[in-house]
């Protein structure tokens, strides 16, 4: 199994942290991983994208993929490039709070109120972690405990005061979509 996950949004939404947490969580579960983050020249407000490939054998996909199994969209402003890479039948989990773009009919789409949930938890900047956990619960790509451990390993020392809030965001996100079974996703050839 080799699964390509694209994560996109606007700089400052936590896209790069979410991608790093996914990559670390997969390594904690003894999976093969590649991770590539790309972002524009602005600190906040520009485009930010990441590609994470998770596999149970050596990875064949290059770090920049032309076709993907799934995508997480924090905002629709830069969605077009990601949308063009999603295979028919692919999974799109989007932030319902900030995502207004029309999505293709040939995708499996789930809308998650990530920004709203994060704000209700008192941590408005943790929306990408809410999204990531919802996506992982749905797809069973990695488990929530691995996400929590990976998040704690990923945040820099000067941001450790956010670790507990980030954990609450991950745990809340994991409850937002129905739990999936990775074996079912493996059977789907997208």
Image (spheres, helix red, strand yellow):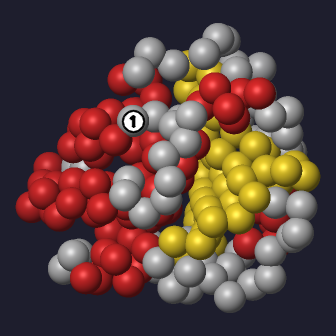
Q: Is residue 53 visible?
A: yes
Picture residue at 75% right of the left edge, 58% below the top: 108
Q: Left or right? Give the position of 49 relative to 25.
A: right
Q: Is residue 46 visible?
A: no
x then y, percent, for residue 168:
21, 60
In the foreground, 114 or 53 = 114
Picture residue at 49% right of the left edge, 59% below the top: 177
x then y, percent, for residue 68:
78, 45
x then y, percent, for residue 51:
64, 46
Q: Left or right? Give the position of 124 relative to 41.
A: left
The image quadrant of residue 153 is: top left
Q: Left or right? Give the position of 159 relative to 1.
A: left
State the quadrant of the C terminus: top right
Picture residue at 55% right of the left edge, 42% below the top: 180
Q: Left or right? Give the position of 123 relative to 29.
A: left
Total marks shown come to 1
Picture residue at 41% right of the left edge, 79% below the top: 115
Decide: is 119 above or below 145.
Answer: below
* Mark 1 surroundings within 10 Å by alpha-carbon count, few (fewer than 14), some (14 through 19), many (20 or more): some
| Residue found at the very far left of the displayed protein | 161
| Residue found at the very far top of the displayed protein | 57
The image quadrant of residue 94 is: bottom right
Decide: is 128 above or below 96.
Answer: above
State the quadrant of the N terminus: top right
SS label for mark 1: loop
Decide: is 104 above or below 99.
Answer: above
To which residue does mark 1 refer?
143
């Amino acid at each position: 199994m080799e699964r390509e996950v694209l994560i996109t949004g606007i700089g400052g939404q936590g896209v790069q942290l979410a991608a790093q947490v996914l990559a670390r969580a997969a390594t904690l579960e003894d999976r093969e991983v590649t991770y590539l983050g790309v972002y524009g020249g602005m600190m906040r407000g520009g485009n930010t994208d990441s590609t994470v490939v998770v596999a149970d054998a050596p990875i064949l996909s290059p770090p920049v993929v032309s076709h993907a199994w799934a995508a997480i969209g924090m905002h629709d402003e830069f969605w077009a490039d990601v949308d063009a890479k999603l295979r028919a039948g692919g999974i799109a989990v989007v932030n319902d709070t900030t995502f207004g773009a029309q999505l293709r009919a040939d995708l499996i789409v789930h809308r998650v109120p990530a920004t709203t949930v994060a704000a209700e938890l008192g941590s408005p900047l943790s929306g990408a972690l809410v999204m990531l956990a919802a996506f992982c619960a749905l797809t069973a790509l990695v488990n929530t405990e691995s996400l929590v451990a990976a998040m704690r390993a990923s945040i820099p020392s000067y941001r450790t005061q956010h670790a507990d809030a980030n954990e609450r965001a991950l745990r809340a996100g994991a409850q937002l979509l129905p739990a999936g079974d990775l074996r079912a996703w493996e059977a789907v050839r997208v």
